[in-house]
Amino acid sequence: MVEVKNLTKHYGKVTAVNDLSFEIRDNEILGFLGPNGAGKSTTMNIIAGYLPTSSGTVNVCGHDIKEDARAAKRCIGYLPEIPPLYPDMRVEEYLRYCAGIKGIRGGEVKKEVEKVMKRLQLTDMRRRLIANLSKGYKQRVGLAQAILGDPELLILDEPTVGLDPTQVAELRKFIKTLGKDHSVILSSHILSEISAVCDRVVIISKGELRAVDTIENLERKMSGSPILSLTVEGEQLAASFVLGEVKGIKEIQDIIENDDGTSVFKIQLEDEKVRQDIMAALVEGGINVVEMSMERPDLEKVFLELTGKKK
């Protein structure tokens, strides 16, 4: 669907994007992550054909974005972070205008506009001035113009920013359905949003690629030695003594004593199987186990690790 090869973009002496390579597969929702200033918007603007490259290539549906820009852009629907709306136009009027820009002609204009208004629940707002719409409805109008003509690729830059929780949930659900018929590249600072809807993620930092993989694979790769969280009742020293006799424990990283008489041990293991030996030893030692669970890195921890950020 989309192939990005050795993409580089310079602004004078500043390198915004440096030698990026990745692909977007057919009917895939690809999350695009990076801290502020990482080069996400620059990369998406280049893929959309709004910015030229300094070097490297972007191929969309078999069309080079530089050599065959018109054909490539016909395959793209783009929703930038600030939707390109005209506040003095009415919703239907604006969508008809966008349809014309996209080369939709004749009776297909009405058909396409009606279809996208229905999909985004804008039919009742067709005569409303865009200036008088709420933030949520303005975002829907912006997304409606992006999907006009059923483009193969949708580029969505922070589509849920500024929306209330209900609107966010509705838009996430809609974006998830888009992956059935389109390839989608989704940029968002909300990591839970990326986890909820994306098949794979690209993580960049300072314009350079840090990772391309599924969220599950990234979490597994970043986990290192497994960490066991163990909550026990009774004497902390007695539990510590029993744990000290169990083979396969690399390190007890932390012990937290709670007011209710329980203690929480953070234990680094050589292998997850060691927890069975830990449970057996504690039972034999008369230590009451309240809770035992494995701690795993989530997307936030992976992101912070790969981009060099610390909480």
Image (cartoon, rainbow, N blue to C red):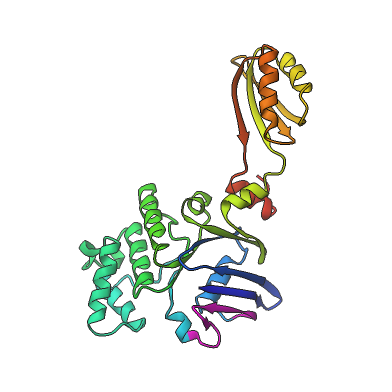
Question: Is 58 within the magenta?
Answer: yes
Can residue 90 be seen here? no
Number of numbered tags placed on the structure image: 0
Quadrant where the C terminus sits is top right
Where residue 267 sits: x, y (%)?
71, 30
Query: Where is residue 157 drawn, in percent x and y?
Result: 48, 64
Does the image show residue 131?
yes
Q: Tell me if residue 213 comes above or below residue 234 in the rendering.
A: below
Q: In this view, does 137 lie to the left or right of 172?
A: left
Q: Residue furthest bottom?
A: 67
Foreground residue, 220 or 102?
Answer: 220
Q: In this view, does 103 lie above or below 8?
A: below
Percent from the top left, x then y, of residue 309? Answer: 67, 51
18 w.r.t. 261: above or below: below
Task: Tell me the residue at 41%/54% (across/down).
Answer: 172
Q: Quadrant of residue 306?
A: bottom right
The range drawn in magenta is 53-69
- Please give left or right for residue 92 compared with residue 256 in the image: left
Residue sitting nearer the eye, 214 or 131: 214
The answer to whether 143 is drawn above or below residue 292 in the figure is below
Horizontally, residue 167 falls left or right of residue 216, namely left
Q: In which quarter of the image is residue 125?
A: bottom left
Find residue 303 and report its horizontal and vertical position in percent.
Answer: 62, 52
Q: Does the magenta stretch include residue 244?
A: no
Residue lying at 40% horizontally and 74% vertically, measured from the top left = 151
